[in-house]
Amino acid sequence: MMNWSLAVPELVLACCGMAILLFGALMKRRETFHLASMLTIGAFLITAMLVIAGPHGLAYHGQFVADSFSGFVKLLVLAGSAFAVVASLDYNEHENLRRFEFPVLILFATVGMMLMASAVNLMTLYVGLELQSLSIYVLAAFARDQLRSSEAGLKYFVLGALASGLLLYGISLIYGFTGSMQFDQLARVLADPARVSPGLIVGIVFLVAGLAFKVSAVPFHMWTPDVYEGAPTPVTLLMGTSPKVAAMALLVRAMATPFGHLLGQWQQLIVLVSIASMLLGALAAIGQRNIKRLMAYSSIGHMGYVLIGLAAGTPAGIRGVLLYLVTYVFMSAGTFACILAMRRRGVMLEQIADLGGLGRRDPVLAMWLTVFMFSMAGIPPFSGFWAKYFIFTAAVQSGLWALAVIGVLTSVIGAYYYIRIIKVMYFDEPQEAFDPRPPSLSLLAAGSGLFTTLFFVFPAPFVGAAETAAKVLFG
Amino acid sequence: MLYAVAVFAPLLGSAIAGLFGRAIGDRAAQAVTILCMVLASICGVTAFVQLVYLGAPSGMVVLGDWVQAGSFHVSWALHYDTLSAVMVAMVTCVATLIHIYSVGYMSHDHSIARFFSYLSLFSFAMLMLVSADNLLQLFFGWEGVGLASYLLIGFWYDRPSACAAAMKAFIVNRVGDLGFAVGIALVFTLFGSIEFGSIFANVPAHMDATYHLLGHDWRAYEVVGILLFIGAMGKSAQIGLHVWLPDAMEGPTPVSALIHAATMVTAGVFLMARFSPVLDYAPGAMAFVTFIGATTALFAATVGCVQNDIKRVIAYSTCSQLGYMFVAAGVGAYQASIFHLLTHAFFKALLFLTAGSVIHAMSDEQDMRRMGGIWRLIPFTYAMMWIGNLALGGVFPFAGYFSKDAIVEAAWAAHTGIGQYGFWCTLIAAFLTAFYSWRLLIMTFHGTPRADHHVMQHVHESPPVMLVPLALLGVGAVVAGFVFRDQLIGADWQAFWGSSIQIAPGNHVLRDMEDLPAWVTLSPSVLGLLGIATAYLFYMIRPEIPPRLAAAFPAGYRFLLNKWYFDELYGVVLVAPFRALARLLWQVGDVTLIDGVPNGLAALTAGGSARVVRLQTGSIAVYAFSMLIGLVVLVSVFLLFLR
């Protein structure tokens, strides 16, 4: 059944990408970065509308699915990528990175991520993942005349290749032991416990390892701090938002649909990874002085919390995962917008100490950063609190008390370094003022900040959509 | 409407002086608060006159909803009946005079705006208390005066003794408040409402209700009566919970006059009168009230006889007079207790303010042993002290004569054993009252000057702004008695009080007071005069007698001087064990455990952080290696779990 119309959003986006590429190549002498960026954002908007309006169903002989879950994830991915493009406008201008390939690469990464959200076949999964990864490898090394950026890109590429190898090896094991790559067929086969063999289990572990690398869960997280620090900040923003969402969605779908019957087995695996991520995220961030590195550890910790929801293995848990990802994308994008605004006399700053006295120099920026930090720490009424609330409730309902307790304890530790930033901003010696903020960053910070602050006023549409999306996976 | 203005004008004054005192300056803050108080007193007196003499209907002024929770409804509403109107009129008038007096007395202070703001806040809370339409609102005012008194006693917060006194007042009151709060809860479970109207309307319905406590069924009215009285004991400084009142003299003298004479401490008496419809059916609780009141009257009077601080003598006198009021309430003569409350407000405020005038003249000296011989220098103050003393001592025709005699007679007329106890206690206390009053007068004004000549040179009459309130209060202390006697406790008291005081059909105390043996009627006056004569003999003619008496009965003297050792007893029984427990919880519980655990955890966390960060070397080989190690660990764990 070649119902290709279900993939119209991806097709349109890919075509737009090629058109923009062509356009950029032809208009060589002119300044094309801004125009290409705007066109990319426009393409994202069109795609988002197509996603919302599009029908649901299976396509391409059961290799591709459009359902509420994929729709939810795709919209979130598009939002995250759009934020990255917006954040890059001013940064690339100043850092001499204004090349039209930049937004186009983000666009192609986004196509890959959307494919990941829709993958119901191990092969589609791999193709989507690789499209996304390859684009981001290039983006990480985009500031190619800077040592740190090149190093980050190379590190990410080498380790990413290793992770892809693990993933492929896992896929081949699974295929070898079950004879299928289709999620629904796998589920049917594995409903019979006799078909579960150690080889299959090893395959699943390899698959999880490959995906855990993408969401930077411990022990596959080592690349995160270095790459976050080295990559151009808008790229870090991108890595902190959409790919995390897409990879996590992929992990959720892969665990819940084909291997749903094996919950008893892989649950322990996810619990272990989750605990390790939360602990490392909380502990390692304490000693950091560079705010981008801090955000890297913070993202590791947050992925640990998200994995709690997956470990719960219930619709409530998956709903928690999706809601957490929503709030996380906005918090993260907002925080990076604030980090991007840290520029003094044309030089980008990354040290936490540089924020000293921001409360007096730029009260608005300080306020938004305070909002994001409080939200990340999980303090009500900000959205981060509600995300944690949904996750922990689901864990407790599934009897995962230990996980919930560890989660609460590590968020207490986490609160320390988040609130330290607030302390630095409001109580430390004032530093020289930052350069004036460009409107794009102000807009991004204010938009994410408002979402984070006011989430508790209108959570119903998000909770409802997440609920519908989560139910899809449990048929 | 006027009534609401009378209650809320002081709040407005307080808010303006408190919030904008710095901006508008001391003068303006004084002017605003006094203006608001004057307005309040005009409205208060008008409301009183309209209700009692011009036949305005009583009722309530609803201001809005407060709490709506299930069957629990409470509104903000002002109760407008004779009892409340009398109290509002009295409180606003006395408070206004004290505000004016304070302009002179506090003229050298640094934070005048703050003082006037507190003073007005206090007046507002007291007005809220007396005009409340339900128990919760009454409790609001009750706690409000508690707060305001805490702020005012500790007004000079740089004096450790003032801070200690403020805390003592607050904490001791809390003990009583607990009883009161439980009493309110019990009233709600009993009547399903805490609004006075619906409580008093349903009194006959719950006559036989019982309350199970400590394995025994008690009549619910008795329990309610006792609980409310425990609250009243705290606020009105009855024996056992009286310890805060003498210490409260640490506050500025106008505060002593306002809080510890005229208004706040009378809240308990007011509560008894307000609950007369219920209390009259609780004979056991009433006996308890009489007993405590009579004991306090006698106890405080004995202590007052040996104190040397001029304000402390008056403070113990207040304590004693409050005992009188509770005796009256306890034998069912609520009218007499409010009557005494009213006259006492005038003459006690007068006494305190006169004492303040003396202290002002003596360069802030409060010890009577370092006074004397100043009556020629401050004649007006001296005359006012005489009026106050005559009223307090119960000499005809001063205010105290009428109200105090009424109480002593009511105690006799109760014809009960506890009534007899009350009668004899109050009679002896009448003698002691007269004695310590004139002891105070003679020690302060007569004899040879005992202050150094530096102080004596500065002795001067207070400014008119202080003397005018004295004169007005003096007029009240003279006339309040015979003006109000027939209306408040005469044969047709019902015409005056309306439905605000309801007594049981069997309560004939007021009627029986009319025909008593002659000696009962005369004895308070005779004993009072005897007390005056004794004081005159001891301190004027033969000043060597008191020291000799003290030397002859050292144990008795010290017992009285140390106030029956109440503070020491509480120190040993309550304060010391509590301190020990607190120290234990602090040093072991808090410092070691509560602080230690997080500090240890924090150190552990920081250490863990350093170790984790050290793994992050930046070497790509290490990263890849750790990924593979992690994979191996996961696979082995997973395979182990599968088995």
Image (cartoon, coloured by chain):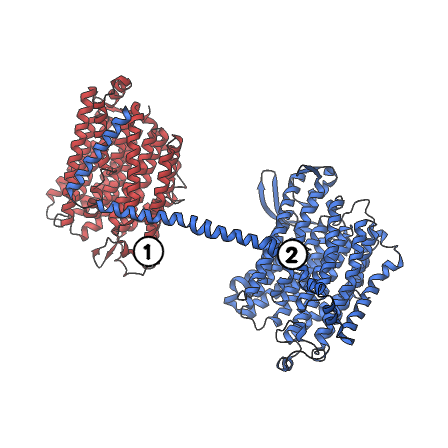
Chain colours: A red, B blue
Q: Badge 2: how crowded within 10 Å, few (<14), some, or many (20+)?
A: many
Question: What is the three-letter code of the residue carrying label 1?
Answer: Met
Q: Which residue is mark 1?
A: A425
Residue appearing at x 41%, y 41% in the figure: A457
Q: Position of residue A418 (x, y in %)?
A: 33, 49
Q: Position of residue A169 (x, y in %)?
A: 17, 28
**Residue B567 higher or lower than A157, as above or below:** below
**Residue B113 higher or lower than B180, as above or below:** below
Q: Quadrant of the N terminus of chain B?
A: bottom right
Tell me if residue A300 can be seen. Answer: yes
Q: Nearer the viewer, residue B457 or B142?
A: B457
In the drawing, what numbered circle is on residue A334?
none
Label count reads 2
Q: Is residue B71 left or right of residue A80?
A: right
Question: What is the three-letter code of the residue carrying label 2?
Answer: Leu
Give the structural element (helix, strand or loop) at label 1. helix
Give the structural element (helix, strand or loop) at label 2. helix
Q: CA distance from mark 1 to mark 2?
A: 48 Å
Chain of the residue on which disc 1 is drawn: A
Q: Which residue is mark 2?
A: B127
Chain of the residue on which disc 2 is drawn: B
Residue appearing at x 75%, y 48% in the figure: B286
